[in-house]
Image: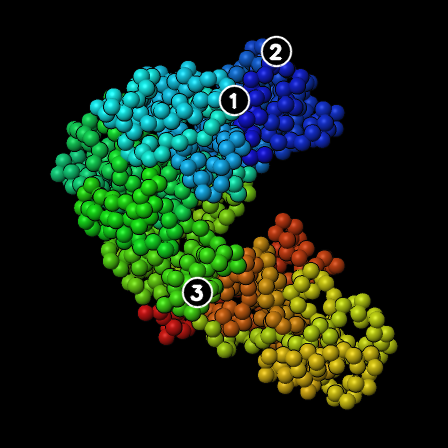
Amino acid sequence: MNAVEIEEAVSELAGQPFDRDEFPFAFLEAFGNKSTTIKRLRDGNSNKSANAGAVLQRNNIHIATCDAGKVSETLTQLRESPATIKAKAKFILATDGIDFQSENMTSGETIVSDYKDFHEHFGFFLELAGISTVKEIRESAFDIKATGRLNRLYIELLRSNSDWATAERRHDMNHFFARLIFCFFAEDTNIFSGDNLFTGTIQQMSASDASDTHEIIAEIFRAMDTKVSDRKSKEIRNWALKFPYVNGQLFSGSIDCPKFTKIARSYLLHVGNLDWKKINPDIFGSMIQAVADDDERGALGMHYTSVPNILKVLNPLFLDDLRAQLEEAGDNARKLLNLRKRMSRIRVFDPACGSGNFLVIAYKEIRKIENEINIRRGEPNFSSEIPLTNFRGIELRDFSAEIARLALIIAEFQCDVLYLGQQLALAEFLPLDAQNWITKGNALRINWLSVCPPTGTGVKLHADDLFSTDLEQAEIDFDNEGGETYICGNPPYLGSTWQSKEQKADLQAIFKDYTKTWKSLDYVAGWFMKAAEYGKFTNASSAFVSTNSICQGQQVPILWPLIFKTGHEISFAHTSFKWANLASYNAGVTVAIISISNHPGSVRKLYTINEKGQSIVKEEKYINAYLVGNENVIPKKASKPINDCNIMEFGNKASDGGNLLLTGEELAHLNLNKSDKEKYIRKIYGAAEFIQGKLEYCIWLPKISLTEAMKISAFNGRINKVREMRLKSSKKATKQKANTPHLFDEIKQTGEGLTLIVPSVSSENRPYLPAGILDKKSLVKAPNFGMYDAPIWNLAIITSRIHLVWITNVCGQLETRLRYSNTLGWNTFPLPKLTAKNKEDLTACAEEILIARERHFPATIADLYDPEKMPEDLRQAHERNDEVLERIYIGRRFKNDTERLEKLFELYTQMTSKEKVV
């Protein structure tokens, strides 16, 4: 169940007569518990409560109903119950059908309400449905409730107006809903005079069978697009004259409305009867965008980015500086006036604005600072000098773009009410500004300078006008001469594997003149390059939420030298953290925040998340492309190790069409005797075989000639097939190997010593890289890596935490998995000069790791390195290894991965001083 479905179920339960015995089960059912789960609780099989009549669901909630007036007492009993603690209940809940009380056992948050109103607090319990939540949602259920009701109406209208469901008319439907949302908000905030004017008029004037509902709404829209002085000549109906002239092109153009069914009419009235004063534009805007998107509707009510996350972008980008200047100004009227003038000229530009979250939050925060200035200057009723048209956006989806503009309009009105009072707010609100400042279009194809020019007051937009379908472009003016420009947002990420043809074409259009290797870039890289190009013409600063992949692996040497060449540097960054949205399935996205500027200042701020989940900041002289406090050094592939470690090579490459490699079943079918098996068959390991314990074999004949090999009848057919396959190859080198079809294409293992294996690709979730030792008769299969006859202290290096950190950042990932590279990861790994004693200690550590693994035979590497199930003795062996190795670096353990990377890049810079990016 999504959040909207849960809200509807909880609201329905709150509207039913209270049934003391049934309530606990009905409550759990409303949060998505299956009928089989409810049955087990009813039967007592899974009910862990020791309290009579109570229901306790392990790891979830302890619910008790009680006699009238006993709610507080019952809640205390639940809190003190040993069963509550033993079952690790997240919530306790008590009700008598009159009062309703609950407590979050982890945070200590509580709710107390009348029973009939408990549905207003459903967000408090979303965790019961596996949905991570944020404070804003817990405190207000209105936005999800409104989203759900509007969604019902949207689907019903599409169902009964098939022509409006087509791609050609979907824009009309979305525009119609933008008009409705404005009307619902306006009638509850006194923008429309009279109580319940819009909903009440429809209810009173339209027929109960809904046959003329669309006509009544169309006439209301026509009235709001007609100046009062013109209404008589336009023959506006008397009952519509109460509606104000709105302008703003919101109601201009076609007033065609979809036809209503009785169900649709009832849904409309139901939505209108909600209290729209409670709307929070930065929450509602995010959620409502899913209504118009068929692909996103399943996650309805889930689209919400918390304000603290947005402020991680906006605060260091420019808000912190404004607040610091406010603090420095104190009560100095002249300094405060200068700050107010500065803010009136700031332009905030989100070129992937969605429903306008970043713009709305930026606007509200600037208004908050402006209000404080006005208070300090003794001008509390001074009208705002912060124009909405300074908050520009580009959005691909038309409904999201319309909602972004509406969200800003609503945010402006709410700020006016808060800071100027209702009367002044209403006096300045209508008519709306006819100009449009949110552009519908593809941000990677539009010239950003045409949307948000750095100076001047005029701009021409080559895109559709959001609130009028008959204009191909709009003239949009700024209210004042341009000052600073701040570009921000959360563009789409999309790694190269998941990009559509159109998206790849977008990147090609941007990067084709810069690099031939652009195809490996994440889609978000386009926004960074466009921002850098934009910054060549102004002193703009940009900050985007991004996947951390653009700061790892092969993308770094492709993207960042291009950005640095434009004169931009990284001015601040948040290293990887979870971008927690409302939905549990969306909460795991790991992102970074990266800001680029052509005037970054002498101090760069690098934010990291500590073990307690707190954000900490460190001031750096530089931040490089890997988000490390170091100069712009980008490691390059090396043909041999820059340290004194041993050579790591590719494994043996078969190029055999699957004929020299054998499964266990294929080996059995060869019917070889024991002697021939021992002479000619070897186990061979790739990543899957080594990590997951799978078995694969190969025909291994490096010591005999082709003539001798063909005398072994079991191998004849396979060897001939290898010859055929190689002869058909387009590669000259492979064709030449057709002369020796009994041999592997590339043979790396010539001795009989121990082999150290390193898989080329492995899971990113493991705490250490899965390397190990093979016996003397086992082989490594390319493209995996091997170290042949090398001392095992090398294994201590490879399986260390600090090496994993280097590989993760320098080598990057294949899809989401770690990609290992000998030339880029191993050969470039910065390692202090090792003494004989260091190597002896590291050898002991490697042996300890191998012994710990053996203790758990036949557990596989995948089993042993599952982060949730890793054996304690193996974990301790790795901890000991990390302790020994890290003391070689700095004489102690590193505090965190950021410190590890900083030291590694410091060493790398020293060891390869000629590799700097200029």
Give the residue pinned by disc 1: 262
Q: Which quadrant is home to the C terminus?
A: bottom left
CA gap, disc 3 and disc 1:
55 Å
Looking at numbered disc 1 in the image, what kind of residue is underneath it?
Lys
- Classed neighbour count for the residue bearing mark 1: other residues with Cα under 10 Å, few (<14), some (14–19), many (≥20): some
Residue 670 relative to residue 32: left or right: right
Looking at numbered disc 3 in the image, what kind of residue is underneath it?
Trp
Residue 150 relative to residue 345: left or right: right
Viewer-nearest residue: 162 or 310: 162
Residue 803 in view of the camera: yes
- Classed neighbour count for the residue bearing mark 3: other residues with Cα under 10 Å, few (<14), some (14–19), many (≥20): many
What secondary structure is marked by label 1? helix
What secondary structure is marked by label 3? helix
Residue farthest top in this picture: 68
Instruction: Tell me whether circle 1 and circle 2 mark residues in contact (CB < 8 Å).
Output: no
Q: Which of marks 1 and 2 is nearer the N terminus?
A: 2
Residue farthest left in this picture: 334
Instruction: Tell me whether circle 3 and circle 2 mark residues in contact (CB < 8 Å).
Output: no
Q: Which mark is residue 67?
A: 2
CA gap, disc 3 and disc 2:
69 Å
Residue 883 in view of the camera: no
How many numbered circles are shown? Answer: 3
Q: Residue at x 42, y 55 (%)?
A: 524
Q: Residue at x 27, y 52 (%)?
A: 450
Q: Which residue is drawn at 43% across and 52% down?
A: 546
Give the residue pinned by disc 3: 518
Q: Which residue is drawn at 34% across and 57% down?
A: 530
Looking at numbered disc 2 in the image, what kind of residue is underneath it?
Asp
Residue 465 relative to residue 783: left or right: left
**Residue 58 sits in which quadrant?**
top right
Q: Which callout, 3 or 2, points to the residue nearer the camera?
A: 3
Instruction: Tell me whether circle 3 and circle 1 mark residues in contact (CB < 8 Å).
Output: no
